[in-house]
Image (cartoon, coloured by chain):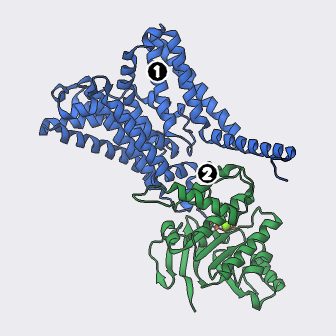
Chain colours: A blue, B green
Amino acid sequence: MTSREDPAVAVSQRRLLWEEWEDGLARFARKYGLQIGIICVLLVIWGVFIIGAPATFLSREIYAAFMSTIPFFALIALPLTLVIIAGEIDLCFPSIMAMGTLVFVKVLEATGSPGVAFVFCLVTGFLIGLLNGVIVVRLGIPSLVATIGTQFFWRGVVLVVTGGHPASLVPVKGTFLYQVLVGRLGGYVPAQMLWTIFVAVLVWVILNRHKFGAHVYLTGDNRESARLMGVNVARTRMMTFALVGLAAAFSGILASLEVNYFWVTLGEGYLMKTLASVYLGGTSAFGGVGTILGTFVGCFIIGTIEAGTVAVGLSGFWTQLIYGLIIVLSVAMHAALNRRLAK
Amino acid sequence: MDYILEMRNVSKRFGEVQALQPVNFVVARNEVVGLVGDNGAGKSTLIKIITGYHQPDTGEIYFNGKKIEHLTVAKARDLGIEPVYQERALADQQTLWRNIFMGRELVTYAGLLDVKKMRQETQKLMRESMGFTSAAVTPDSVVRTFSGGEKQGVAIVRALYFQAELIILDEPTMGLSLSETRKLLDFVREIKRAGKSCIFIDHNVFHVYTVADRIVVLDRGAVAGEFLTKDITLESLMDKMYRVAQTGSLD
Ligand SMILES: Nc1ncnc2c1ncn2[C@@H]1O[C@H](COP(=O)(O)OP(=O)(O)OP(=O)(O)O)[C@@H](O)[C@H]1O
Ligand SMILES: [Mg+2]
C-alpha cells in the first residue's frame, strides 16, 4: 500500500512536512529575526511620519535630504559595527573626521592637487585608527578610555593647528574629485549615498565572506577560544580600529565638501547618532553578534526621526527624547528576541 | 627511536609560579602518551607550549626531528598538531560551522570564505562523526544550546577534520556520560589505529591506563616518572601516583 491510498500515512506525512516547514521557519526566524525586526521598526516609524506629515514625507525633497546627510554617519557606523562585534568601542572618530580634513586642507595648500590631498586624508585616518588599535591592544587599555583620550587629543591638534579658524573648500568645487565624492547623479541622487551603499556592500562582504570578518566575530564572542584556536586576535582588533579611522576620514572630507567649508568642530554631533545606529541595528554591546543590514537600517531610522520630529510639527527639542525612546525600545526588543530565540 | 615530538629542557614561569621546571618530553610516532598528575601539576601548561599558545622560557622543541622556532598556534596547526582543550575553545554565539573551522577557515582566493564548502563539510561531519541525529541541529545552529557532551564532540571533530598528526586531548572526558566516555576512548584507539599520535590528559587513571602506551607522571612542574603500560599493573600505577602526590617521589 502506498501512502497515497492510506489516509493515516498521508496525514502523518503531512504532519511531518508541516513540522519540517515549522522547523525551517524557526531557523529562518532565528537567523534573520533581528534584521526583520529592525526593518519593521523603520517601516512603522516611516508610516507614522507619512501620516503625521504627509506634505513632507511624500515629497521628493525629504528623500534627497536623507540621502545627502545620513551617509556622513552611516559611512562610519558600518565599520564601527565591526569594532563593536569584536567587543570593543571607538569614540575617537569625530576627531578623526576633522583631522582627515585638516590634512586635506594642508596638503591641498602645499600641492594644489585635490587628488593627492584626498589620498593623504585617507591615509591619515587609517593611521590614527591604527594607533587607537595599537594603544588598546598593545598597552592593554580599555578601548572606552583610550578612545576618549585620543578623541580629545586629536581635536586638540586640530584646534591648535588651525587656531580655531575654518578653511574654505570652495576652490575644490567643480573639480572631478568633488563630482565623484559629493556630486548629484542625475541631478538628484547624492554621490555620498552611492558611496554609502558601496561601503555597506564592501563591509558586508568583509564581515560575512572574508576570513577577517570571521575572526572579528570569533574575537568578540570568546577572545580566549579564538586565541587558543590560532586566530590572530591582536591583529584583528587593531585592524577594526584602523578601518573606522579610514571611514571617518572619508566621511569627514565628504561632509566638508558638501558644505564647501572645513569647520574645526567637524564631527561633533555625530558621536551619539553613529553609536545609536549600530546598537539600534542589533549589534550586541557584549560583542560577537551584529549585522551590517541592521546598522544600515539603524542609520536610516535615526535619520528619519531627526527629520521627522520637526516635520510633524514637534519642536527640535523633541528629537532627543524620541531618539532615546526608540533606542531603549529597540534594544529591549533585541534582548527579548534574543532570549526567545536562544531557547 | 622515531619521535614525532621532542621537547628538551622546556620550562615556563608565570610571574611567581614556576609552572614547569625544565622538562624533557617526547612522543613517538604512533604512540599514545597519557599525561597524569595533580591539579596544578603543569599538564595544561606543557601542552599549551606544544600547541604554540604559550612561549616557553627555555628549551627546544623538535617536530618530526626538525627544530621549531617561535611556535604559534597557527604554525602548530599547520604542522598537524590539533588540540582539544579542557576549556573546549568554542565561540558560543557562533554557528556550528564557524566553530568547526575556527582559526582555519577554508578560503577560495584573497581570503574570501568558502562558506558553501564549510557548511557541507560540517553537515558531513555531523552525520559521520558527531552522531547528531536531531533535525533541529544544522551547520547553522548556534553552539550555545548544545549539551556539554555535544560541545566536546564539536571540539574533537574539529581536531579530526584537519587530519592531525598529533592530537592533544586535555581532560576530554570531563562532563561526559558513561557512553560518551566510552565513545571517546574508542576514538583515542582509533587515532592509534590510524597511525597517528596522541597526548591524553585525564584525571581518571582507568581511562588513561586502558588507552595509553606510555604514562608520564607530572608533579609540581617536573616529570616524576614514566611507565610503559605493558610493564606496570593498574594497582602499582595508582600506588605510585598516590605516593608522588604525597611525598613528591615515586618510591
Ligand atoms: N596563564 C597563567 N597565568 C598564571 N599562572 C598560570 C597560568 N596558567 C597556569 N598557571 C599556573 O601554573 C600552574 C600549572 O597549571 P596547569 O594549568 O598547567 O595545571 P594542570 O596540571 O593542567 O592542572 P589541572 O589538572 O587542574 O588542569 C598552576 O599553579 C597554575 O595556577
Ligand atoms: Mg589542566
Q: Residue A219 carries which label?
A: none
Residue at 54% x, 41% y is: A290
Residue closest to the eye, A6 or A77: A6
Apparent side of residue A259 relative to residue B13 in the rendered image (left or right):
left
Q: How crowded is mark 2: few (under 14 residues within 10 Å), some or many (20 or more)?
A: some
Q: Quadrant of residue A67?
A: top left
The amino acid pointed to by label 1 is Thr
* x then y, percent, for residue B50: 56, 73
Vertical order, A139 against A333 (above or below): below
| Marks 1 and 2 close (CB-CB < 8 Å) | no
Apparent side of residue A102 relative to residue A137 in the rendered image (left or right):
left
Q: Dividing the image into four equal quarters, which quarter contains ligand 2?
A: bottom right
Q: Which chain carries label 1?
A: A
Q: Which mark is residue B95?
A: 2
Residue closest to the eye, B118 or B142: B118
* x then y, percent, for residue A101: 26, 34
* x then y, percent, for residue A4: 80, 47
* x then y, percent, for residue B28: 60, 86
What's the distance in space between the residues labelled 1 and 2, CA to CA? 34 Å
Q: Which mark is residue A304?
A: 1
Specify whether residue A205 is in view.
yes
Residue at 40% x, 26% y is: A70
Q: Which chain carries label 2?
A: B
Q: Which type of secondary structure does the marked residue at label 2 adopt?
A: loop
Residue closest to the eye, B45 or B182: B182
Apparent side of residue A54 relative to residue B180 in the rendered image (left or right):
left
The amino acid pointed to by label 2 is Thr
Q: Is mark 1 within 8 Å of ligand 1?
A: no
Q: Which type of secondary structure does the marked residue at label 1 adopt?
A: helix
Which quadrant would the C terminus of chain A be assigned to in this image?
Answer: top right
